[in-house]
Image (cartoon, rainbow, N blue to C red):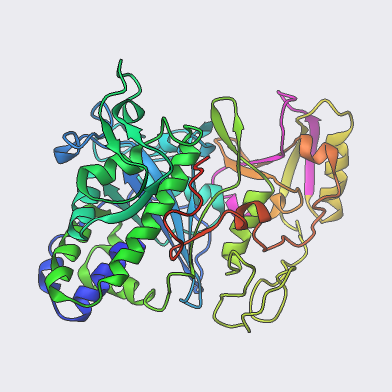
């Protein structure tokens, strides 16, 4: 999305194709966006970018997913910091286990919330060819606690056209790749499709590169994410290197707008231009790519807490991957605690006045519900009940809440390190304490949420100016 917006900025800025662009931008309906959303912010913007592997139209010819239902093959949340000089794209694994809140289907009815399901299934709610980007947006807001300002969907055909229009993208591979690496059910190795080392890819070959999973690195989707991050970084670098040449800019901008389906807030050339203008000062080195903290859970991926919460908190506080204040108001100096003037202020102490909760023990440790209840009462929460949960295998604390209680649930979650909130049809708020609380009940206790990026994330960050041949382990 950063590269696409940059293309629109360049073309519209020099007066080429502006009127034509205004009629070629597809939008999706905002009716399915939840009314229970995190608060917005005047500092920075969050853009959700979804890659769809739908087989509709030209996508089937290019190798889209099987069946007629649109699926999300990749997704990342782009945060443009308040100073408009830094940006970070956070990849969310498609196999990550998340909670999907209520979503609107094509029949107009809202679904029941789902617990511990694959992240990419949100895009398939309703089982339509175009997918359900509003449901994915709801899920990301629920997961991160950040308001998504805009959502963009890019399909295979649009991606292919864009890479061809830009004249190819430089990539690098640690080994030779054969047809069976792309299609593991082939009985033979097949022909070689990629050589080892640096090369330039476009169109179908670019799609094959970003879809490649088997036969390289550890063969995982996480490894593929790293390769996709390297590709987007190289694409941005290639676009910026071409300069303001109207001969090349017009086909690039046409490909960019044809590639996208956007929310109504970006559904015109002037709105896209306005958004792109907000990013014109971001240089390559200050454009970062990271992955949400994760670990394997069987064949799926679990999001690691409290590291993930610390990452989302850093974005909310406009603190960069390397710890700098990028709110646009501070001195720009780094801080371990994120509390210098201008950004990353410590959260106010937790107050539960007016919040009523029931507490359940989701572990086999006796007395944990009563202990948590005492903590809540000490912060002025009203506790109506303590009991044993229906299951005693909760690894972390869950704050379950009913309609309209999201803000109160998030306040409650601040008392429990690594707690996640989940909406259900139940009335009120239920605190189900898990194993993480049993191991360290004083870990949160209302302490300020740190707004520094976990080292596990920062150490693996990629910049858009990195050499495409750097860090080729891919898992």
Q: Is residue 144 above or below residue 324?
A: above
> Magenta residues?
382-407
Question: Is 31 covered by the magenta stretch?
Answer: no
Quadrant in the picture for residue 122 = top left
Q: Count up the numbered dots.
A: 0
Answer yes or no: is residue 19 visible. Answer: yes
Q: Position of residue 365 (x, y in %)?
A: 86, 29
41 vs 445: above or below: below
Q: Is residue 275 left or right of residue 297?
A: left
Image quadrant for the N terminus? bottom left
Q: Residue at x 48, y 54 (%)?
A: 470
Can residue 22 be seen? no
Q: Residue at x 18, y 58 (%)?
A: 165
For the point 15% across and 40% down, the residue is 58
Percent from the top left, x then y, of residue 22?
Answer: 15, 67
Residue 33 percent location from the top left of the image:
39, 50
Q: What residue lies at 54% left-to-right and 80% top-to-bottom?
A: 328
Toward the viewer: 153 or 245? 245
Q: Nearer the viewer, residue 440 or 105?
A: 440
In the picture shown, does residue 334 fall above or below 219? below
Q: Is residue 238 left or right of residue 81?
A: left
Q: Say which quarter of the image contains residue 465.
A: bottom left
Please state which of residues 474 and 80 is positioned toward the viewer in this rendering: 474
Q: Position of residue 235 (x, y in %)?
A: 33, 59
| Residue 403 lies in the magenta-colored region | yes
Q: Nearer the viewer, residue 441 or 192?
A: 192
């Amino acid at each position: 999305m950063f590269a696409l917006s940059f293309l629109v900025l360049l073309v519209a800025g020099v007066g080429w194709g502006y009127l034509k662009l205004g009629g070629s931008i597809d939008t999706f309906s905002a009716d399915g966006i939840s009314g229970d959303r995190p608060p917005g912010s005047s500092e920075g913007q969050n853009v959700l970018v979804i890659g769809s592997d739908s087989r509709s139209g030209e996508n089937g010819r290019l190798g889209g997913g099987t069946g007629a239902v649109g699926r999300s093959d990749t997704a990342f949340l782009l945060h443009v910091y308040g100073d408009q000089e830094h940006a970070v794209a956070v990849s969310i694994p498609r196999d990550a286990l998340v909670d999907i809140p209520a979503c609107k289907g094509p029949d107009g009815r809202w679904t029941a919330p789902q617990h511990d399901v694959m992240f990419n299934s949100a895009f398939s709610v309703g089982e339509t060819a175009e997918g359900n980007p509003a449901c994915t947006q709801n899920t990301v807001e629920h997961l991160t606690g950040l308001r998504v300002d805009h959502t963009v969907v890019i399909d295979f055909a649009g991606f292919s056209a864009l890479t061809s229009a830009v004249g190819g993208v430089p990539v690098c591979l640690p080994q030779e790749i054969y047809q069976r690496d792309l299609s593991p059910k082939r009985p033979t190795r097949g022909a070689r499709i990629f050589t080892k080392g640096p090369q330039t890819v476009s169109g179908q070959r670019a799609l094959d590169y970003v879809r490649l999973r088997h036969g390289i690195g550890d063969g995982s989707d996480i490894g593929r994410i790293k390769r996709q991050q390297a590709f987007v970084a190289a694409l941005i670098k290639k676009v910026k290197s071409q300069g303001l040449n109207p001969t090349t800019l017009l086909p690039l901008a046409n490909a960019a707008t044809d590639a996208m389906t956007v929310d109504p807030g970006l559904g015109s050339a002037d709105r896209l231009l306005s958004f792109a203008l907000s990013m014109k000062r971001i240089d390559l080195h200050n454009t970062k790519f990271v992955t949400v903290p994760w670990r394997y859970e069987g064949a799926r991926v679990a999001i690691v807490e409290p590291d993930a919460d610390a990452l989302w908190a850093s974005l909310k506080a406009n603190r960069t991957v390397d710890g700098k204040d990028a709110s646009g108001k501070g001195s720009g100096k780094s801080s371990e605690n994120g509390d210098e003037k201008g950004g990353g202020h410590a959260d106010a102490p937790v107050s539960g006045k007016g919040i009523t909760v029931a507490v359940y023990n989701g572990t086999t440790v006796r007395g944990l519900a009563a202990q948590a209840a005492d903590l809540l009462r000490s912060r002025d929460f009203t506790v109506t009940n303590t009991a044993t949960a229906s299951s005693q295998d909760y690894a972390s604390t869950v704050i379950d809440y009913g309609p309209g209680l999201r803000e109160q649930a998030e306040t409650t979650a601040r008392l429990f390190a690594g707690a996640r909130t989940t909406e259900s049809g139940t009335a009120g708020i239920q605190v189900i304490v898990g194993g993480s609380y049993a191991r360290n009940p004083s870990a949160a206790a209302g302490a300020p949420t740190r707004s520094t990026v976990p080292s596990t994330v920062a150490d693996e960050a990629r910049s858009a100016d990195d050499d495409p041949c750097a860090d080729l382990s891919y898992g």
